[in-house]
Image (spheres, rainbow, N blue to C red):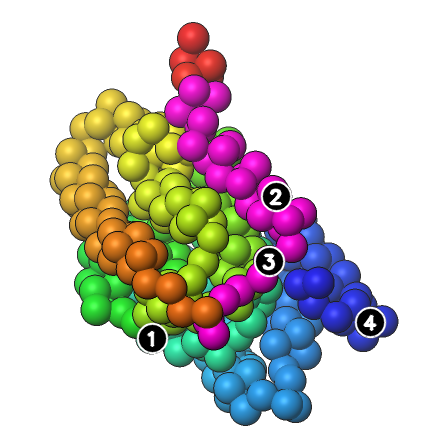
Amino acid sequence: MLFMINSNKMFFFFTLFFSTLISISSNSWLGCWIGLEINLLSFIPLITSPNNLLNSEASLKYFLTQSIASINFLFSILLKLLFMNFFFHNLFSIMINSALLMKMGSIPFHFWFPNIMEGLSWLNCFILMTWQKISPLILLSYYMNINFISIIMIFNCIFGVIGSFNQNSLRKLMAFSSINNLGWMMSSLMISESIWKLFFLLYSFLVMIMCLMFHLINIFFINQLFNINLNFFLKISIMINFLSLGGLPPFLGFFSKWMIINFLIMNNMFLISFFFIMSSLIMIFIYIQIIYSSLLFYSFKFKWFKIFIKYNYIMIINFFSLISLMGMIFSTFFFI
């Protein structure tokens, strides 16, 4: 099981789900702020564990950073209501955008994100990388400062790549990959909401596969991929999904990035396209280094490191990996 089902956790999962709906369906900024606060108070009990000091530390850090972001967001809203002046429009939009960027762990407020990811389970990592970004991103689209967000998008891609170098922790690697993909999400949000929905669904699908695989084989560090005598097909599945997450054709992850690059070039945004393409190439290079080393180490046979995974789980992972592998074939139907 991914998590122990009990009444408390089920209650907080429901409030986590409904708080996002409150935020994105609210008619006022104050209602959006209330939804974000309920979301914060729902997620903290899910990541808190009395048996794990790292979880407790992560929950405290998450509470502090999200509280600061919420205070900034509320302060920006109140200023906007008090000074309804066109002269301050850009200033208020940057203030509100900065508070939302801090909420989802974007540049330049990204320092808390990898540290908190390091103390979470794979299920909580999946929630933090996907569901927790929905409310801030949709609220960002309501009051977006295009020039400010364009700069942030480029820096997200650059710093996501820089942070991924020489990483030993898989959770931190996934965190910096999430920061990198956040730049793509913002650009898709600038283009159209339907493209953002498609990109977010595909990204969530790929992150779900990665987190599920790492949870089932119970690994948290890259060197465990080298030492542990894994099933060979499982290593191939990890390779496929890493490359798909990086956006290498013909995998599924390439399709969403292909659409965004296509729209950016059509709108003459060549500089942003250049940074996006270069960051994806470097991320793929980092993933290939990890995959290549882990496949080379397959020849080692450590019986005391043998892992037994249920056949049903391997079949599920292989099925998802097949979807990821055949993604380009499926995606071409959209262009026929």
Q: Amino acid at mark 4?
A: Asn
The residue where tag 3 is placed is 309
Q: Is residue 60 visible?
A: no
Q: Nearer the viewer, residue 27 or 54?
A: 54
* Residue carrying label 4: 6
CA distance for labels 2 and 4: 25 Å
Q: Residue 196: where, in percent of width, then height?
A: 46, 38
The magenta span reads 304-331
Residue 316 is labelled as 2
Vertical side of 316 occupied by 289: above or below: below
User: Where in the figure is residue 289, as x and y percent of width and height?
Assistant: 22, 55
Report the residue marked by disc 1.
111
N-terminal-most mark, 1 or 2: 1
Q: Secondary structure at mark 4?
A: loop
Q: Residues within 10 Å of mark 1 (few under 14, many from 20)?
A: few
**Quarter in which the C terminus is drawn:** top left
